[in-house]
Amino acid sequence: MKKVVLSAFADEIDMDLTTQMDVLDSHGIKHIEMRGVNGKNISEVTVEEAKEIKKELDDRGFKISSLGSPVGKIYLKDDFESHKKMFAQLLEVASILQSKYMRIFSFFMEPGVNHDDFTQEVVAKISELAEMARPYDIVLLHENEKDIYGDTSARCLKLVNGVNQDNFKLVYDPANFVQCKESTLEAYNLLKDHVLYYHIKDARSADDTVVPAGDGDGQIAEIVEAITDAGYNGFLSLEPHLGNFAGFAALENLENDDVVELEKSDANKFGIAVTALKSILENKAIAYA
């Protein structure tokens, strides 16, 4: 039987961990891709706070599928040594939370530059991060994202081949490929051998608006069918982006004024996202836990 494991960016429900778990429990989801928790971004969580979070998770039977870190969401000209200190703490937190994976990015590019001119520098910095993560047995998963080096499928492939380390692989996010004007199926076929983890987020190519899975141009039903036909039984991590939430402006490299008009993300909007994904899975006869 084809089967996947559901996870979620639970900070799009609420920043409070108890509320996150309550809502996830109501949907039968027992994994979290932890990005925001108890009023903090995961990069701000201390080792002692991580220990308390782990206890709360254990008490409720929850596990961490990945850390949704902001690592790599800086410009190449920014202070990389300071960024590595934040990353070093994240590695400790990931170890405490028993997270096998950590989501990262490949640096914002300045407007108007040719991304490919910076391949060597980006590969060198990501390689350094992968070496730092190696003693922790943590796999770094690069997310394709607009405005960073690895925005297109071709550059994602160039990056993973350039780093060429067994603890550096890819997250596949269909909505981000839509927003970069790429065919999601073509991107999948190019990258599938390097992808270990999937985000579930959809978008319309006409205006880049993020919508529930199946309502956009991300071809999510086709992607999910293809990966499970190929034997994938890992995580599908819901990242709804159907409303504004704490840290959204920074996450999207936007000014706060650009997002204030968005309705607040909440449990109801999260429920819409869950229902849309479960409908796709059920229509494709794919079991989920």
Image (cartoon, rainbow, N blue to C red):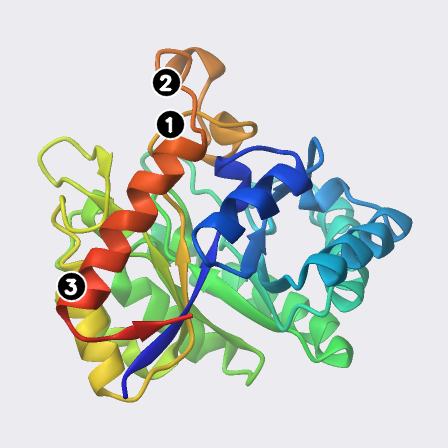
Using the rendered view, name the quadrant where residue 90 is placed.
bottom right
Q: Earlier in the sequence, mark 3 or mark 2?
A: 3
Q: How many angstroms separate mark 1 from mark 2 (CA)?
A: 5 Å
Q: Residue at x 29, y 78 (%)?
A: 192
Q: Looking at the image, which residue sits at the far left?
A: 206
Residue 42 makes an appearance in the image: yes
Give the tally of numbered discs.
Answer: 3
Badge 1: residue crowd in 10 Å (few <14, some 14–19, many ≥20): some
Give the residue drawn at x 77%, y 53%. Answer: 56
Sequence-wise, the earlier of marks 3 and 1 is: 3
In the picture shown, does residue 261 fall above or below 138?
above
Question: What is the three-letter code of the residue carrying label 3?
Answer: Ala
User: Eyeballing the image, is 3 above or below 29?
Assistant: below
* Mark number displayed over residue 243: 1
Mark seen at residue 221:
3
Query: Residue at the spot x=43%, y=28% of the render?
Result: 265
Q: Quadrant of the C terminus?
A: bottom left
Secondary structure at badge 2 equals loop
Amino acid at dot 2: Glu
Q: Quadrant of the N terminus?
A: bottom left
User: How far, Cα to Cα, is label 3 from label 1?
Assistant: 23 Å
State which quadrant residue 131 falls in: bottom right
**Label 1 close to label 2 by CB (< 8 Å):** yes
Residue 153 drawn at (x, y percent): 27, 64
